[in-house]
Image (spheres, grey):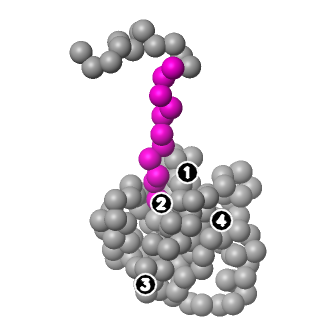
Amino acid sequence: MLGKPLADYQLHQLPPIRRSPMIAIVDDDQAVRNGMAALLRSLGHSVAAFDSAEAFLESGQVSTTTCLITDVQMPGMSGLDLQKRLIEEDHRIPVIFLTGFHVETVRSRALKAGALAFLRKPVAQHDLVEHLEKASRG
């Protein structure tokens, strides 16, 4: 028998439940979503991918997300609007923005609101990994 039966433990003796880091990818471009998800999974991360900010918000996975990678410009809710909504709802998730259109005012707005990074597509793997490591350290 391995260890004591569960009934023999006092509540304070149970080991803590550790939350596995889960990275959410929000991008309307399926190729970007699939490529990013495959890369992150190959690095050992748990990943959930969504085609819109609305799909992410409705997924029930917001509270389990430990880092969000999102496109800036998407149909419907933009990445910036998603960031704002998460802040308003008190979800403190590190956000990494991806964009194909670098506009300094948009970059400044995202970073001022607390974004971890604002990266231009195509993203270099080492840049993404560096920012994910920052997110995991808090």
* Magenta segment main secondary structure: loop
Is 115 placed above or below 20 here?
below
Tag 2 secondary structure: strand
Q: CA distance from mark 3 to mark 2?
A: 18 Å
Q: Are marks 3 and 1 in contact (CB under 8 Å)?
A: no
Q: Are marks 1 and 2 in contact (CB under 8 Å)?
A: yes
Q: Residue at x 46, y 13 (%)?
A: 9
* Within-10-Å neighbours for mark 2: few <14, some 14–19, many 20+: many
Give the amino acid at mark 3. Answer: Ala
Instruction: Mark 3 vs mark 2: give the one in front.
Output: 3
Q: Earlier in the sequence, mark 3 or mark 1?
A: 1
Q: CA distance from mark 1 to mark 2?
A: 8 Å
Instruction: Mark 3 vs mark 1: give the one in front.
Output: 3
* Within-10-Å neighbours for mark 1: few <14, some 14–19, many 20+: some
Quadrant containing the C terminus is: bottom right
* Within-10-Å neighbours for mark 3: few <14, some 14–19, many 20+: few
Q: What's the magenta region?
A: 13-23
Q: Residue at x 50, y 67 (%)?
A: 132
Q: CA distance from mark 3 to mark 1?
A: 26 Å
Tag 4 secondary structure: helix
Tag 3 secondary structure: loop
Provide the residue designation for mark 3. Answer: 124
Question: Which of the numbered marks, if any, corresponds to residue 62?
Answer: 1
Is 36 placed above or below 59 here?
below
Q: Residue at x 56, y 19 (%)?
A: 12
Q: Residue at x 48, y 43 (%)?
A: 19
Give the amino acid at mark 2. Answer: Ala
Provide the residue designation for mark 2. Answer: 24
